[in-house]
Amino acid sequence: MIPGLLKSVVIFLHTMFASLIIYLSGIATRKGRVPSLLMDWWGRWFIRIGGWSVRVEGMEHLPGGGAILVSNHQSLVDIPLLVGVINRGAAFLAKRELGRIPLFGKAMTSAGNLFVDRDDPRDAIHLMRDAVRAIRGGKLIVVFAEGTRSGDGTIGEFKSGAFYLAQKAGVPVLPVYIDGGCRALPKGSLIFRPAELTVRILAPLPAESGTAFSKQEIALEARRRILAARDGEGARSGALL
């Protein structure tokens, strides 16, 4: 087993190397598919180097086409965890600051990830257009609906933007419960620690829910399902369905 500090250094070097390859592949191919596949590779090896065991449930719920995956958020580990598990070139809708990280931000852009400046309404409009286009083209878009990381695993209120996007694109919303990231890399720490990671993909909220219910109601139902998954109750049918 690699000691914590050395593990952190190896993961950092792996991330920088992968970012360079992803960025250069984007320049060479001018298409998002190859960088997306390389991003999946980065995520899988990130988890392997970390030495974490991963429990995955609900992969059968992933549709063949585009959809929005709405997840809770615990740690910086969550992004490589999800791309490695989904392994289908999923993209993230993230805040603009992530895209400004040297080299890594360029790699994420090359792989088709989308960034928004939450203080600029015009930026949000452009992002929504790009996201709808990507989803209708078969892309899976992941959104951390709380808008920030939880330091202790608690699940905050969900912002409604992802659910508005699902309504516009006419695609299902899949709630996703993840756990363990806050122990693998506690908020504010740079040292990776041993942990067991969980990814539980829950049954989708159908696209037609967007026509009958408000985005706030869909957000409440998605959060309720994730809380139920955290508490071991599974993905029970809710009021929206």
Image (tube, helix red, strand yellow):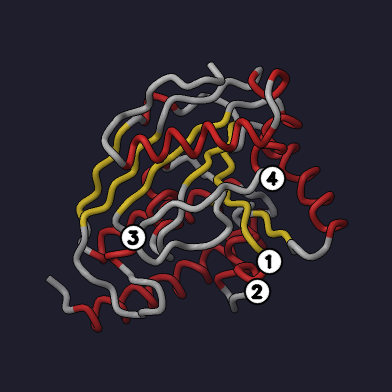
Numbered disc in front, either 4 or 1: 4
Q: Quadrant of residue 57?
A: top left
* Residue 136 visible to the viewer: no
Name the mark on residue 219: none
Give, as a three-letter code, the residue at label 1. Answer: Arg
Give the distance between the C-alpha atoms of the residues marked 4 and 1, in whole angstroms.
15 Å
Task: Tell me the quarter of the image containing the N terminus.
Answer: bottom left
**Between marks 3 and 1, how big is the CA–CA gap?**
22 Å
Which mark sits nearer the N-terminus, 4 or 1?
Answer: 1
Residue, x 50% and y 32% (percent of image)? 174
| Label 3 vs 1, first from the N-terminus | 1
Going 53% across and 39% down the picture, which residue do you hit? 69
Instruction: Say if mark 2 contacts mark 4, CB within 8 Å.
Output: no
Residue named by callout 4:
161
Query: Callout 4: few (<14), some (14-19), or many (20+) C-alpha neighbours within 10 Å?
Result: some
Which amino acid type is marked by label 3?
Gly
The disc at residue 100 is 2
Marks 2, 1: nearer the viewer: 1
Q: Residues within 10 Å of mark 3 (few under 14, many from 20)?
A: many
Which residue is at the front of the view, 224 or 91? 224
Contact between labelled residues 4 and 3, with CB atoms less than 8 Å apart: no
Q: Marks 1 and 2: in contact by CB < 8 Å?
A: yes
Q: Residue at x 37, y 44 (%)?
A: 85
Q: Which residue is mark 3?
A: 181
Q: What secondary structure is marked by label 4?
A: helix
Give the SS element for disc 2: loop
**Does 38 appear above or below 187?**
above
x%, y% of residue 99?
64, 68
What's the CA distance linking mark 3 and mark 4?
24 Å
Q: Which residue is mark 1?
A: 96
